[in-house]
Amino acid sequence: MGSSFFTPLSWSDSGFILTGVLNTVYISLVAIIVGTLLGLAVGFIRAEANKATNVLLGGILDILRSVPLIIQLILFSTYIGAIGHPLDPFVTGSIVLSLYTMAFMSEVFRGGFESVHQSMIVAGRSLGMSYWQTVVHIRLPIGLRAVFPSWLGVALSVIKDSALVSVIGYMELLRTSEQLISRTQQPLEILIGVGLFYFIVSYPLSLYGKYVERKMAI
Amino acid sequence: MEYEFHWNIVFDKLPQLLSGAFVTLHVSVLSMLIGIAIAVLLAIAKMSDSRLISLPATVWVEIARNTPALFQIYMAYFGLGAFGIHLSPYAAVLSALVFVNAGYLTETFRGGFLSIPKTQYSASKSLGMSSIQVYRYIILPQMFRRIYHPMTNQFVWSILMSSLGILVGMNELSGETQRLQSLSFRTLEFFIVAAVMYFLITKFVLFSASLVSQRLFRGDI
């Protein structure tokens, strides 16, 4: 004791921690929204497209799912730096995390679209609906409802995976806490707080997902 | 601006990268084996009627499922220091992966077990089978079929997540790549090769798993 090199955690750090929390929420929301929209489009294309397009698209999505997120973040951030267009860590992180989310979401939505029985679409067409009317009024509502629990599962994993964006310098919650740890040397208190935050966000949503799944199973 | 690739530096270091890939496989296989053993116990505990036994299992499962893997690794690497436990990077990543794998697999095992109707148990009993025979020939084979694919996915997840070892200075594929690129600054080349290696490892695991499953479960509907 007596050394002033390490300063203990104090209330004045709460603003710093809050920034980390908000940044985590912020980048997770961006990735979930953009990833869902892109995934919806790609999932629809995959459900409709011919074999050749599917093999090509599937291959690209497969790479996004089979290479660790942390490597994708490092590669993309190094690449745009090397070609002379460095971006803000938030933008870089959002792009990579959104594409990563898209890769998982597209499979979820593809399954949803394919779960809508052909006879319903035929029935819609025979009632005089156009192709896009069957998409908007039949395939989207029925297909999307079926995959809601899976969608929620992917969204929750994105919130957790957003912690990895810290590797390219984005000040999300875990990086904030890491900096606080090196200053205060109080790892346990800080990490328990961080864990609690993720838990409080994720646990109720996962319970809700299970509830919906059980309700739909009947 | 054009970026000029220099691959020779990377190919010279291929043996080190391969040994990093070996550590990646090593830590993920081990985390699966220990994780499976713990998950079996947790699944049994979770199905217990006594809350005293089921509650700790539930707490483990929910913490593992609802917090980031990176948080678990930091907890093992920095957090345990508060108790005077100082783990090596390898031990920290291994214990974090074991913790998460056990949590996810518990639910997999429990779901697999509960999916088999109780009537099968009574039917086998009435055919004169002993309890051990019922589990050995009736319950466990069916259960294994149902948990096989989730287990394969969990293994792939472990391989991919062991890449977080880079953040605590572990010598698995990502950490080794990081160390090697810092000597030459050919960051892109090194990480592209690492990405390809992860892709190949993942594909190899999934391909072998599907071969094994065709052999194990042939004739099944």
Image: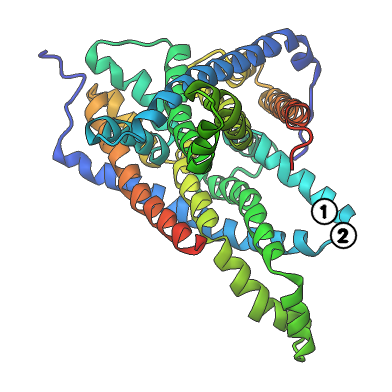
Q: Disc 2 designates what residue?
A: A50
Q: Residue furthest bottom?
A: A128
**Can you say which quadrant of the picture contains the C terminus of chain B?**
top right
Q: Is residue B156 visible?
A: yes
Instruction: Residue A168: give x, y in percent of width and height.
Output: 52, 36
Type of amino acid under label 2: Asn
Vertical order, B38 against A100 (above or below): above
Determine the residue positioned at 75% across, 90% down: A127
Instruction: Residue A129: give x, y in percent of width and height.
Output: 74, 88
Mark 1 belongs to chain: A
Q: Disc 1 designates what residue?
A: A54
Disc 1 and disc 2 in contact, CB within 8 angstroms: yes
Q: Is residue A166 visible?
A: no
In the shown orientation, is residue B161 left or right of residue A109? left
Type of amino acid under label 1: Asn
Instruction: Residue A30: give x, y in percent of width and height.
Output: 50, 56
Quarter-wise, where is residue B173 in the image? Answer: top right
In the shown orientation, is residue A112 left or right of residue B97? right
Q: Secondary structure at mark 1?
A: helix
- Distance from disc 1 to disc 2, alpha carbons, whole Å, reads 6 Å
Q: Residue furthest right?
A: A52
